Amino acid sequence: MEQILRTQTQAYYAPRNAGHFGLALGSYAHFTSPIRRYADLVVHRSLVRAYALGEGGLTDEEAAAMEVTGELISNLERRAMVAERETMDRYVAAYLSDRVGTIVQCRITGVQPFGFFATVEELGGDGLVPAATLGDEYFRYDEAGQRLVGEDSGEVYEIGQRLALRLAEADPASGSLRFELPDRPAGRARPARPQRRDRAGHMVGRRGRPANIRHRGRK
């Protein structure tokens, strides 16, 4: 379900009726009662104005500015979500900081050419497993399948896969985590693969693997 949600367009507020894909509704307005957010208040005041229910409806100026208001509260909601996610990341990293070196059960939530991201089961907190620490063989990034595939062994790491990982680093200040495979010596990375060149002499297959990349695609 998490991966399906990531492929969908993020919700946004706008005066135009766009329906609701998930609910299969042609007409939809986001509204909660009691009022908990500014969008709820805007819908409430719009109804008061539209049906002449008394005082408190939108003014002409406010009604004309609905597009701008929708963009503003959509952006503010995204900022709040980022702040919430980063706060949770820091709490999780602080909680795990005295458990560095232990084995934790994880699930792969994202795959990139430089490695894969995993989240700790039943706790949260995303961490990177650098591709350079996966073994002596080279792991090819399969973008269509969202997976890393070992060129020699055919070993696969893909989204949704559950596996045990060793917690190698937990930084409460940044909220970042780093994991390693439990069957490899701590801190050991394989040598970089020599760069190949095409017939024109240009380098091909170049992939960077920054060690401090944080996962921001969650939720």
Image (cartoon, rainbow, N blue to C red):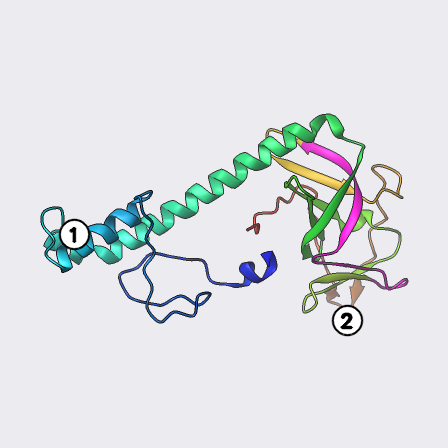
User: Left or right of 170: which side holds 20?
Assistant: left
Where disc 1 sits, the SS reads: helix
| Res 128 quadrant in image | top right
Where disc 2 sits, the SS reads: loop
Q: Residue 198: which numbered mark, if any?
A: 2
Q: Is residue 164 magenta?
A: yes
User: Left or right of 37: which side holds 21?
Assistant: right
Three-letter code for the amino acid on which mark 2 is drawn: Asp
Residue 174 visible, this orientation: no
Which residue is most to the bottom? 199
Q: How far apart are the two marked residues, 1 and 2, measured between alpha carbons?
A: 61 Å
Q: Residue 197: which numbered mark, if any?
A: none
| Residue 95, position as x, y percentages in the image | 66, 28
Q: Residue 62: which numbered mark, if any?
A: 1
| Res 204 quadrant in image | bottom right
Residue 161 visible, this orientation: yes
